[in-house]
Image: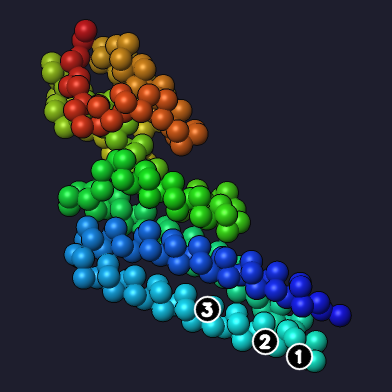
């Protein structure tokens, strides 16, 4: 026998999950559309989210009404369907979040989000996905583009930004350019090896490489204030010091 309490609990979990997906949609669509396409689309996105949410809650109410009727077998099937829907909601939320964070990375180069804004949005999205029960591997996939972008900022700073290293030979310039490849990013060992060969592995570069190593391993910033500074104003490499 399926008790009404079990059904209500299942529906409650599903309703909360749907609400969190709607919240993710709001977090994702509104700021992104504001940056990329203007305020009118963000308002349309909010309206769409509200309509979807209203529809979902209407469906939940209809199923709950069935729960107090005599069709127990059908009720069990509805509970099973609700669990499937919850799993699909997780997939939808993760996919929406992945698209959002990737779009946020790209919008950075057209007057997009500041680091503080993007990090706040990322934290909110990941928190909601965690509440929904999205697994750790899927979380890493969701954040991949953002993590890659920040890792590239570390490499960019370590190698002195866009300025060609002072005192570099033609061969050294070519090697420096190769180290600045977009993907895959150079490893910690490759960075140390290159800077050692050209005589540019000073104390500050060592610390930046350690910061980079921690970030790619743990997704955390060891010296956030330093990262934010060198991200905007990398110090040019001076070879042979």
Q: Could you tell me which residue is drawn at 29 percent across and 74 percent down?
A: 44
- Is 236 placed left or right of 61 in the picture? left
Q: Earlier in the sequence, mark 2 or mark 3?
A: 3
Q: Nearer the viewer, residue 169 or 122?
A: 122
The quadrant the N terminus occupies is bottom right
Proximity of marks 1 and 3: CB atoms separated by less than 8 Å: no
Q: Could you tell me which residue is drawn at 64 percent across and 69 percent down?
A: 12
The quadrant the C terminus occupies is top left
Q: Earlier in the sequence, mark 1 or mark 3?
A: 3
Which residue is situated farthest in the bottom direction here? 70
The Cα atoms of the two marked residues, 2 and 1, are separated by 7 Å
Label 2 Cα neighbours within 10 Å, binned few <14 / some 14-19 / many ≥20: few
- Is 71 placed left or right of 193 in the picture? right
Q: Which residue is mark 2?
A: 65
Secondary structure category for the residue under label 3: helix
The answer to whether residue 177 is above or below residue 201 is: below
Q: Could you tell me which residue is drawn at 54 percent across and 83 percent down?
A: 58
Label 3 Cα neighbours within 10 Å, binned few <14 / some 14-19 / many ≥20: some
Q: Which residue is mark 3?
A: 56
The Cα atoms of the two marked residues, 2 and 3, are separated by 15 Å
Proximity of marks 2 and 1: CB atoms separated by less than 8 Å: yes
Q: Which residue is mark 1?
A: 69
Q: Nearer the viewer, mark 2 or mark 3?
A: 2
Work out whether residue 223 can be spotted. Answer: yes
Whole-percent x and y of residue 177?
22, 33
The Cα atoms of the two marked residues, 1 and 3, are separated by 21 Å
């Amino acid at each position: 026998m399926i008790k009404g309490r079990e059904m209500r609990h299942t529906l409650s979990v599903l309703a909360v999950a749907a609400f969190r997906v709607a919240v993710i949609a709001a977090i994702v669509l509104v700021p992104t559309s504001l940056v990329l396409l203007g305020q009118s689309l963000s308002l349309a996105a909010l309206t769409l989210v509200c309509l979807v949410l209203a529809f979902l809650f209407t469906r939940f109410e209809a199923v709950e009404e069935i729960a107090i009727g005599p069709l127990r077998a059908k009720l069990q099937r509805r509970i099973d369907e609700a669990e499937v829907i919850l799993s699909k909601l997780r997939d939808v939320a993760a996919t929406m979040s992945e698209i959002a964070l990737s779009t946020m990375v790209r919008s950075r180069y057209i007057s997009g989000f500041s680091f503080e804004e993007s990090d706040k949005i990322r934290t909110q999205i990941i928190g909601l996905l965690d509440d929904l029960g999205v697994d750790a591997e899927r979380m890493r996939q969701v954040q991949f583009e953002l993590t890659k972008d920040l890792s590239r900022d570390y490499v960019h700073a370590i190698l002195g930004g866009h300025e060609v290293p002072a005192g570099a030979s033609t061969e050294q310039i070519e090697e420096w350019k190769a180290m600045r490849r977009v993907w895959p990013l150079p490893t910690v060992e490759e960075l140390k090896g290159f800077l050692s060969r050209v005589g540019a592995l000073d104390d500050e570069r060592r610390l930046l490489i350690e910061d980079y190593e921690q970030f790619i391993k743990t997704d955390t910033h060891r010296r956030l204030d330093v990262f934010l500074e060198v991200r905007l104003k990398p110090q040019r490499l001076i070879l042979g010091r």
